[in-house]
Image (cartoon, coloured by chain):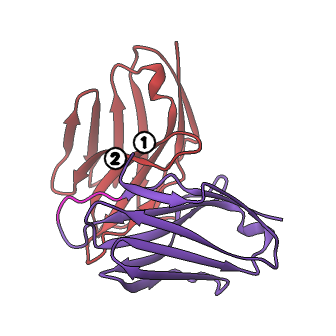
Chain colours: A red, B purple
Amino acid sequence: DQQVKQNSPSLSVQEGRISILNCDYTNSMFDYFLWYKKYPAEGPTFLISISSIKDKNEDGRFTVFLNKSAKHLSLHIVPSQPGDSAVYFCAARKGGATNKLIFGTGTLLAVQP
Amino acid sequence: ETGVTQTPRHLVMGMTNKKSLKCEQHLGHNAMYWYKQSAKKPLELMFVYSLEERVENNSVPSRFSPECPNSSHLFLHLHTLQPEDSALYLCASSRAGQGNTEAFFGQGTRLTVV
């Protein structure tokens, strides 16, 4: 049972345009959502997060939107740059002592120059 | 550099070997995690340690044995592995408890079982 789903395995975008990465979840007990970025041969790097009590969080070119009623979140990157090309993982946290994260399968973003 | 260091970066081992993966964090965190990343699968949580106590074991086979001697170090002892255990093994750490606390990952150990 996959609680966090990223249904698009890959996405290709032109440099300067908007990249939209999507994530769906099934567990309404998740209280915190995160996006991680991963380059080949490296570990995931934290990018941006959002609490379940908010619907938007913005950090520079990156904005995360949360729609709790639809159990859906998205990451917007504007403008997209070639250096953004990487695998993006959505993760959700169940509150508790350990803050363990449940990850999606990832979306490979390719930004074309 | 995320403050979480894993060694070795690459490991090739036979099915009868015994090896250990090491993880060290310098972030003052009190929770540590082992994740496994196989091709085309989500990152799978294997073990969780909070305050040096194992609080979660996600049905991981006994051929994987974690050890957390203190809050800064985490090991994954491997023995009699199978080829399907070949994957990227990632260590992470975080502050346990509530609040906006993301997990920081190491660069991973690429394990190949032959």
Considering only vertical position in the picture, is A108 above or below A99?
Answer: above
Considering only vertical position in the picture, is B87 above or below A72?
Answer: below
- Whole-angstrom CA distance, mark 2 to mark 1, is 6 Å
Sequence-first disc among 2 and 1: 1
Considering only vertical position in the picture, is A15 above or below B51?
Answer: above
Residue A24 at x, y percent in the picture: 42, 52
Residue B93 at x, y percent in the picture: 36, 64
Task: Kindly state the secondary structure of the residue where label 1 is placed.
Answer: strand
**Left or right: residue A106 compared with residue A65:** right
Q: Mark 1, residues whose alpha carbon is within 10 Å: few (<14), some, or many (≥20)?
A: many
Q: Nearer the viewer, residue A5 or B16?
A: B16
Image point 21% across, 57% down: which residue?
A52
The residue identified by callout 1 is: A22
Residue B19 at x, y percent in the picture: 67, 74
**Three-letter code for the amino acid on which mark 1 is drawn:** Asn
The residue identified by callout 2 is: A73
Q: Locate residue B7: give its quadrant.
A: bottom right
**Left or right: residue B62 compared with residue B84:** left
Read off the magenta span. B99-103
> Was residue B49 drawn as part of the magenta stretch in this picture?
no
Q: Are discs 2 and 1 less than 8 Å apart at CB?
A: yes
Considering only vertical position in the picture, is B51 above or below B91?
Answer: below
Image point 49% across, 55% down: which residue?
A104
Q: Nearer the viewer, residue B38 or B11?
A: B11
